[in-house]
């Protein structure tokens, strides 16, 4: 049963720090974890942090989004401009999160920072919409690309049946959740291997593209901005496609409590990762246009595969395999990180208590991982790839813009807060304004999907008062939830973390 969240206090102006004994501060105490202690341990090194960020960013986006960006910009030149702008904007957002991650050393990412800056109601709405829309839809989008690419070598001469894609995708989603429920160390190791596969996949595209440029294959770049028949209202959708491809730079902040030396490793991991990804993405898109025209790219359902078929012959069969592994790594990194948001929100009393429990032997947040499975399956079998992308983008970028606006607010609200890493004020100002402006504009360009996202986001407000504030629930209802919690504890072999047991 959701525990009633503590009300904000005025201690240091901080909601988190004002709670009795600080539920979120326990893992940040600096005390070494004992071997038998049931907690999430600090196992994320700098290299693993880089692999989480790169491994989550480079997924389906670079192989799906070129089509979405080109469609909404209308020209090769404008699409490359959007790719570059989205990379720079993502770097700005990542730098803001680096500051937040070093001054608020708590796991939970967006949820934790909104809770710290604006209090429990907007934080609850954030985790509510993450659980209902953002994460299931994002996982469905990434995993659908995984399913399509992994089946591509078997259907080179014909159309891949949609049912086959969704069935293999369902297997992939289940496998990722089993992996994250079994071992934190193995999840991290596999993520590092998959990150290597992603970089190989990118290089397989970039190197032949550079060779094509050297040979003078530049016909598709002539009059690069000609034929731009896309309207200004298409730019938010192009922005969403581009930012979706770069999204993932914030995931290390979801596991801050598990990062070794977060003051140093979080900014380093973020900056190194964003430079690698931005350069790689722009060069990959340039490589595409050395071989594929704008019209051909729009008709292709698997851009990377079409590119490989033109240049590599039989070796092109390897490309969809690498892309599928890339998408799998993005699924793995996303589930690994976001499950910590649900874990932290449960500790704060904003989600059912079972989600803050840890497996007694494997020391993984098993309930927080598997809670996504049924909702993701619903999204998978009832959604279209591009409508899902626009559907989740409204809520995701609304709250990311709010988080970065919260950084500016905290500068004035708590000027004495230690900030080991600090960005110039114009960076969060520009980033938050751009996010919120594009979110507002998207209501006009795609009113159906963004309207649905907006409506579901608003349901978090009555849900907060019903589930969190209202403490006079019927006794039979509370007993039922307690019984369900105990039953799930026995079935899943989970118990509260040692910190929760001390409260």
Image (cartoon, grey):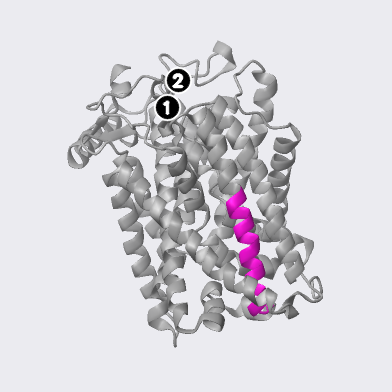
Visible in this render: residue 448?
no
Where residue 237 sits: x, y (%)?
67, 60
Q: Is residue 493 left or right of residue 218?
A: left
Q: Is residue 90 left or right of residue 326?
A: right
Q: Which residue is mark 1?
A: 348
- Find residue 20 and report its image quarter: top left
Vertical comparison of 405 with 147: above or below? above
Vertical comparison of 487 with 192: above or below? above
Give the residue at the far left of this rendering.
490
In terms of secondary structure, what is the magenta stretch mainly?
helix
Pointers 2 and 1 in contact (CB under 8 A)? yes
Vertical comparison of 119 with 376: above or below? above
Where residue 122 sits: x, y (%)?
56, 33
Q: Quadrant of the C terminus?
A: top left
Query: Which disc, if any, is residue 8?
Result: none
Which region shows up in magenta?
A: 275-293
> Could you tell me which residue is drawn at 56 percent across and 47 percent down?
273
Crowding at dot 2, Cα within 10 Å, few <14 / some 14-19 / many 20+, comes out as some
Give the residue at the far bottom of this rendering.
157
Q: Is residue 286 magenta?
A: yes
Where residue 426 sits: x, y (%)?
76, 35
Ranked by sequence position, the earlier of labels 2 and 1 is 2
Q: Which residue is mark 2?
A: 6
């Amino acid at each position: 049963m959701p525990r009633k969240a503590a009300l904000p206090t005025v201690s240091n102006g901080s909601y988190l720090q004002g709670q009795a004994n600080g539920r979120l501060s326990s893992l940040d105490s600096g005390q070494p974890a004992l071997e038998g202690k049931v907690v999430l341990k600090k196992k994320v090194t700098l290299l693993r942090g880089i692999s989480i960020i790169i491994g989550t960013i480079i997924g389906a986006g670079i192989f799906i989004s070129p089509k979405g960006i080109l469609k909404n910009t209308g020209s090769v030149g404008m699409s490359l401009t959007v790719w570059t702008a989205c990379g720079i904007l993502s770097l700005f957002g990542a730098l803001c999160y680096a500051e937040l991650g070093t001054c608020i050393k708590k796991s939970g990412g967006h949820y934790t920072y909104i809770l710290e800056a604006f209090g429990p109601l907007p934080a609850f709405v954030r985790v509510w919409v993450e659980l209902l829309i953002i994460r299931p839809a994002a996982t469905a989008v990434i995993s659908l690309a995984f399913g399509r690419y992994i089946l591509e070598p078997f259907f080179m001469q014909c159309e891949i049946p949609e049912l086959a894609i969704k069935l293999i995708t369902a297997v992939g989603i289940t496998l990722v959740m089993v992996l994250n429920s079994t071992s934190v160390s193995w999840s991290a190791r596999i993520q590092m291997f998959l990150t290597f596969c992603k970089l190989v996949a990118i290089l397989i595209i970039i190197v032949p593209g550079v060779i094509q440029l050297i040979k003078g294959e530049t016909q598709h770049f002539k009059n690069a901005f000609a034929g731009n028949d896309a309207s200004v209202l298409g730019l938010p959708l192009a922005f969403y496609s581009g930012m979706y491809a770069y999204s993932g730079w914030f995931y290390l902040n979801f596991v801050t409590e598990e990062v070794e030396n977060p003051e140093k490793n979080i900014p380093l991991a973020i900056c190194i990762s964003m430079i690698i990804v931005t350069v790689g993405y722009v060069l990959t898109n340039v490589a595409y246009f050395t071989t594929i025209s704008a019209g051909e790219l729009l008709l292709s359902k698997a851009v990377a595969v079409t590119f490989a078929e033109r240049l590599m012959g039989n070796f092109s069969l390897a490309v969809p395999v690498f892309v599928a592994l890339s998408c799998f790594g993005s699924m793995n990194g996303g589930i690994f990180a976001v499950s910590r948001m649900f874990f932290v929100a449960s500790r704060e009393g904003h989600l059912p208590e079972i989600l803050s429990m840890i497996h007694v032997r494997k020391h993984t947040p098993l309930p927080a991982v598997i809670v996504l499975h049924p909702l993701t399956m619903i999204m998978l079998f009832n959604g279209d790839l591009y409508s899902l992308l626009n559907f989740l983008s409204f809520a995701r970028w609304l709250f990311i813009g709010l988080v970065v606006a919260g950084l500016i607010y905290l500068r004035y609200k708590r000027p004495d807060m230690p900030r080991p890493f600090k960005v110039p004020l114009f960076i969060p100002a520009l980033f938050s304004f751009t996010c919120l402006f594009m979110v507002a504009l998207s209501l006009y360009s795609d009113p159906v999907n963004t309207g649905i996202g907006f409506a579901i986001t608003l349901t978090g407000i009555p849900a907060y008062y019903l589930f969190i504030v209202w403490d006079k629930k019927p006794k039979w209802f509370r007993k039922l939830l307690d019984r369900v919690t105990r039953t799930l504890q026995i079935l899943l072999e989970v118990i509260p973390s040692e910190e929760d047991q001390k409260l």
